[in-house]
Image (cartoon, rainbow, N blue to C red):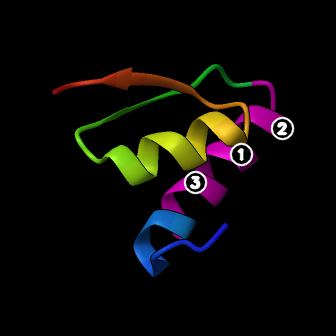
Amino acid sequence: MPLRTLDALHLSTLLFLMNEGIEVELATYDVRMSARAKALGIEVVELG
């Protein structure tokens, strides 16, 4: 699953926080980012 550099940094940070037991969700307008986050098990709040 190809990712843009900043998207990869954001998603890896969210995964790190989730692994530390912190509840997180991603709010985004970006359809690609949303799809990749969902595939990784990150809760997404779609804004658009």
Q: Secondary structure at mark 3?
A: helix
* Range of residues picked out in magenta: 9-21
The amino acid marked with disc number 2 is: Asn
**How far from the left and from the top, in percent, is residue 48?**
16, 27
Residues at marks 3 and 1 touching, judged by CB atoms closer than 8 Å: yes
Residue where numbered disc 2 is placed? 19
Q: Residue at x 47, y 25 (%)?
A: 44
**How far from the left and from the top, in percent, is residue 6?**
42, 72
Residue where numbered disc 3 is placed? 11
Determine if the magenta segment contains residue 14: yes
Crowd band around label 3 with a 10 angstrom C-alpha radius: few (<14), some (14–19), many (20+): some
Residue where numbered disc 1 is placed? 15
**How far from the left and from the top, in percent, is residue 3?**
54, 72
From the viewer's side, name the closer residue of 41 and 9: 41
Q: Is residue 43 left or right of residue 30?
A: right
Determine if the magenta segment contains residue 43: no
Q: Relative to 32, does residue 23 appear above or below in the rendering?
A: above
The quadrant of the picture occupied by the N terminus is bottom right
Q: Secondary structure at mark 2?
A: helix
Q: CA distance from mark 2 to mark 3?
A: 12 Å
Q: Secondary structure at mark 1?
A: helix
